[in-house]
Amino acid sequence: MLLARLTLTDFRNYAELDLTPSAGLNVFVGANAQGKSNLLEGIAMLGTGKSFRTSRESDTIRMERERATLHGEAVLRAGSVELACAIERSGRGTHKSYTVNGSNVRYAGYIGHMRVVTFVPADLSLAGGTPAARRAFVNIALSQSDPRYYHALARYRNVVQQKNALLRGTIEPDPELLETYNRSMVESGTDLVLARAEFIAALGREAARAHARFAAGEQFEVVYEPNVPFEAPRREAVIAAFEARLSHYAEAERVRKSSVAGPHRDDVGLLLDGRSLAAYGSQGQQRTAVLALKVAEYAVMRHRSNEAPLLLLDDVLSELDEDRAAAFLHEIGEYEQAFITATHMPGGLPPGAQTARIAGARVEAYALC
């Protein structure tokens, strides 16, 4: 997959940008606050429809403007696709709209056309951060790879929200309605559990291979830690386990006035030599593990879709020592197109890498490295 053209209008600090990236490695160098991260955020948002930097997406609209637009053309094995995302703010809040090949679509019909794997400094906290961050990491990867997963996730989130409103007393107590919500949670939640189990197993295999090349002699494991333990990754087994867990926690949910059982409380365990990476891993070990995790994400997404995703590295190489940075670039090696930002020109770039300087939201002349 290649991003052939990108146009930004009133996005972050870009009034207008029309960019034609090259295949292979594209490197953007510049001082802080010039627009490097904004550029990668725009590429990622064109693909995923969401910002990887903020949940307040009105912040992506340039100051004193009411609307930002992102437009791009991607070249895939099956042909090209034109994507556009618009963010508009008004007195009623922020609204986003999406088009694919000129036709308006809902978000569910947008995501997945241009897949991206991002690696930003905040991702280094995946090793020691919250379960919610790791769930988000899995959800984004799976939603891009499988439209069925996104639909199941949307259904599940909606029913949990409705059930919580019932438990809080926002609506009148209704045992039959509560049972209906529980059945809906089991139906869509089972889809999530099975998809996560398969994806995380594949992720673990690829991450272990990559980590062995980064740090020989250490064993890295990525394991699924479902909130609903099941005997086997089969639909009937997960359904039975989910129903039993909901029954077991029914009173606890009534007291807490919140849903406490289900995949919205899943986690992904990261282990180094059988011990918790967060609790026992050094900072260097945690960074190496996250590198392996990102290599694995890229590999699994490429294998599942038979299409290499875009690789976006936002000022990450400066967070790594020279050996780890070189090893990471070598490990990713087979990327079709990658975008790297840095404050200084990274060492060890491959021949043919395209370089550009960003200053004041202007991308200055590409040159062969």
Image: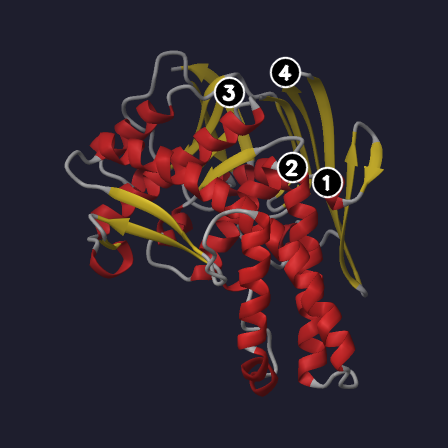
Q: How is the image coloured?
A: secondary structure
Label located before the other in sequence (2 or 4): 2
Kindly state the secondary structure of the residue where label 4 is placed: loop
Nearer mark to the viewer, of 3 and 4: 4
Picture quadrant of residue 45: top right
Residue 77's disc is: 4
**Type of residue at label 4?**
Arg
Between 67 and 82, the one nearer to me in the picture: 82
User: Picture coordinates of residue 63 (x, y %)?
Assistant: 66, 53
How far apart in space, not on screen, are marks 2 and 4 (Cα)? 19 Å
Note whether 107 is above or below 82 in the view shown.
Answer: below
**Type of residue at label 1?**
Cys
Label located before the other in sequence (3 or 1): 1
Visible residue check, residue 316 = no
Kindly state the secondary structure of the residue where label 1 is placed: strand
Residue named by callout 2: 46
Label located before the other in sequence (3 or 2): 2
Note whether 281 is above or below 159 in the view shown.
Answer: above
Label located before the other in sequence (4 or 1): 4
Q: Residue at x 66, y 46 (%)?
A: 150
**Type of residue at label 2?**
Leu
Kindly state the secondary structure of the residue where label 3 is placed: strand
How far apart in space, not on screen, are marks 1 and 2 (Cα)? 6 Å
Between 1 and 319, the one nearer to me in the picture: 1
Residue 365's disc is: 3
How far apart in space, not on screen, are marks 3 and 4 (Cα)? 29 Å
**Type of residue at label 3?**
Ala
The N terminus sits in image quarter = top right
Q: Are marks 1 and 2 in contact (CB under 8 Å)?
A: yes
User: Picture coordinates of residue 98 (x, y %)?
Assistant: 77, 41
